[in-house]
Image (cartoon, helix red, strand yellow):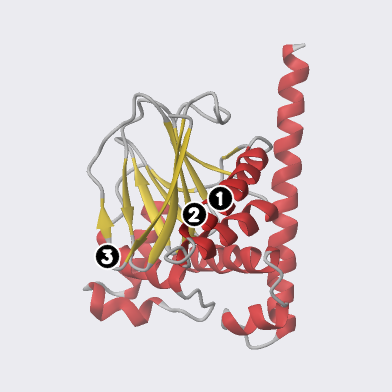
Amino acid sequence: MRLFHSIKRYAPTEEKAPHSHEDFVQLFYIHQGCGIARTEDKSILAVSGQLIWVPLNHRHHLKVLKDTSLSIIHASPDVIPHFYNEMAIISTNRLMVQVMAEIESQDIGSEQGADRNSDVQHHYLAVFIDQLKKQNFQSDAYQSNHDIDKRLLPIIEALTIEPDIKLSLDRFSEHCGASSRTLNRLFISTFDQPFREIRQQLVMAKAWQLSRAGVAHTDIALDLGYNSLSAFSHAFNRFKQDKARQKLAKNHNSLSLVQQQD
């Protein structure tokens, strides 16, 4: 095997059995929805536009939430970089997001002209792999040291399928069998952040994805539940500034490590 790619779509929530791969590494790219990747000691939450890396011989399983579509890439270890010794989120750029959107749209229309679509997908995937070589391990993933409480799953599903800055825990209290205060405590114990912060980050992650795909900010603000463009712009600019600071700090730490090795 050199490289194999497939797209899977899930109507109900589905969970795979724990397993590992001896002959190939694996990547999961989330087109729409949400996936929770689990190892023996941690869980990683990945939403649309994010990429999960699974190294050789790393025991894992994936819970894919309702209305999720994802690309599964199997590759020989020499085809793509070795990012990390454990399962992790890998960075993506605008070109990668656009390429994967094209791959998904080609797959949707693959019943007619399958050979042509397959050839087009092959070329798009080559661009994706080329860009992948410029990416790195992300340390700021939504990660937990234990399994994610099932009462949080409907909330996470709602936030990833239809992100909305006005979404509240009160909406889910009766369905989840817990008060909004209890649900908020579960978010804190699971992700070390309250629901409000998780909601803000998931909404901004969706805004970032839509913005990189060329969607007008006025449309993004309306889609994500903001009352005005100015309110959205303020939140989005702050989000971009935070990302820029994180990138600068990461580059500084990498440079310091190189200098220490020299």
Q: For marks 2 and 3, give the one nearer the viewer.
A: 2
Residue 129 or residue 175, whichever sits in front: 129
Q: Residues within 10 Å of mark 2 (few under 14, many from 20)?
A: few
How far is mark 2 from mark 3, CA to CA?
Answer: 44 Å
* Residue type marked 2: Asp
Would you say 244 lies left or right of 154 here? right
25 lies above or below 258? below
Q: Which residue is mark 2?
A: 115
Residue ID for mark 3: 151
Residue at label 1? Answer: 119
Is the residue marked by circle 3 packed among few (<14), some (14-19), or many (20+) residues within 10 Å?
some
- Position of 47 relative to 91 (above/below): below
Check if mark 2's residue and mark 1's residue have beta carbons within 8 Å.
Answer: yes
Tell me where residue 150 appears, x and y as whole percent.
26, 60
C-alpha gap between disc 1 and disc 3: 43 Å
Name the element at disc 1: helix
Task: Identify the secondary structure beneath mark 2.
Answer: helix
Q: Earlier in the sequence, mark 1 or mark 3?
A: 1
Question: Residue 71, how many percent across, how many down?
Answer: 45, 52
Q: Residue furthest bottom?
A: 227
Q: Is residue 193 visible?
A: no
**Which image quadrant: the C terminus?**
top right
Label 2 – label 1 distance at C-alpha: 6 Å
Q: Mark 1 packing: few (<14 Cα in 10 Å), some, or many (20+)?
A: few
Q: Is residue 21 left or right of residue 17?
A: right
Indicate which disc residue 24 carries.
none
Asked whether residue 106 appears in the rendered view, the answer is yes
Residue 27, compared with residue 83, is above or below; it is: below
